[in-house]
Structure formats: structure tokens, C-alpha cells
């Protein structure tokens, strides 16, 4: 939950914060209570982006490359889901 809070999510209701993250960044309505390994890697990537001054709400090339590697598709296809 600290990672979600660090990129700007209100974490008073952790399940709601995780659901909002999934909707915004992954286009998913998954109701699992814990973040998966892929979701934790997404959060780590977004935190790096924020630390580098790119902002968490604007995915950069690094985020697109990570999504491409994890999905096995092209960068253009990966951006459609953000």
C-alpha cells in the first residue's frame, strides 16, 4: 500500500486504492485483495518514473517497454491498455 500512496492514491480503503490502480493503469476490474507480482512490478516502475520526475500518471517509454515485455506485444499495442 505504501507504493500506491507514494504515487498519489488515498489508501484509507486499501482494496479501493488497488482497484483504482488496476482500472487506471491495467484496464482491469480484478477483485483480488493482494497485488500480484506483475502489479508490484508495475508499481515499482511507476515509482521509478515519479522519482525521475516523469510523474506517475504519464507513462513513459520505460513503462511501455515493461508492458511490452510482459505482454509479448508491440509498444503501440501496450499503450492501448494504459
Image: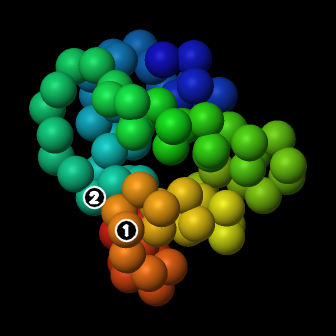
**57 w.r.t. 38: above or below:** below
Nearer to me, 81 or 58:
81
How many labels were placed on the picture? 2
Q: Quadrant for residue 43, please give it.
A: top right
Residue 58 at least partly seen: no
Name the outermost residue toward the right.
52
Residue at mark 2 to residue at mark 1: CA–CA distance: 17 Å
- Which residue is rendered at x = 28% and y = 58% of the image? 27
Nearer to me, 2 or 76:
76
- Which residue is rendered at x = 37% and y = 75% of the image? 73
Q: What residue does disc 2 label?
A: 27
Crowd tier of the residue under label 2, counting other residues whose Cα lies within 10 Å: few below 14, some 14–19, many 20 or above: some
Q: Residue 61: horizontal and vertical position, in percent?
A: 67, 70
Q: Quadrant for residue 58, please give it.
A: bottom right
Q: Quadrant for residue 48, please give it.
A: top right
- Which residue is rendered at x = 46% and y = 68% of the image? 68
- Which residue is rendered at x = 27% and y = 36% of the image? 19
Crowd tier of the residue under label 1, counting other residues whose Cα lies within 10 Å: few below 14, some 14–19, many 20 or above: few
Secondary structure type for disc 2: loop
Name the outermost residue toward the bottom.
76
Q: What residue does disc 1 label?
A: 72
* Sequence-wise first label, 2 or 1: 2
Q: Residue 53: horizontal and vertical position, in percent?
A: 85, 52
Nearer to me, 10 or 48:
48
> Would residue 71 appear left or right of 55 to someone viewing this image?
left
Nearer to me, 62 or 2:
62
Q: Residue 22: horizontal and vertical position, in percent?
A: 32, 45
Q: Residue 21: horizontal and vertical position, in percent?
A: 39, 42
Amino acid at each position: 500500500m505504501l507504493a500506491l500512496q507514494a504515487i498519489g492514491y488515498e489508501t484509507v480503503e486499501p482494496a479501493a486504492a488497488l482497484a483504482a490502480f488496476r482500472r487506471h493503469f491495467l484496464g482491469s476490474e480484478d477483485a483480488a485483495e493482494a497485488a500480484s507480482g506483475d502489479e508490484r512490478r508495475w508499481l515499482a516502475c511507476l515509482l521509478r518514473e515519479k522519482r525521475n520526475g516523469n510523474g506517475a500518471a504519464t507513462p513513459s517509454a520505460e513503462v511501455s517497454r515493461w508492458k511490452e515485455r510482459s505482454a509479448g506485444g508491440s509498444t503501440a499495442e501496450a499503450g492501448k491498455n494504459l
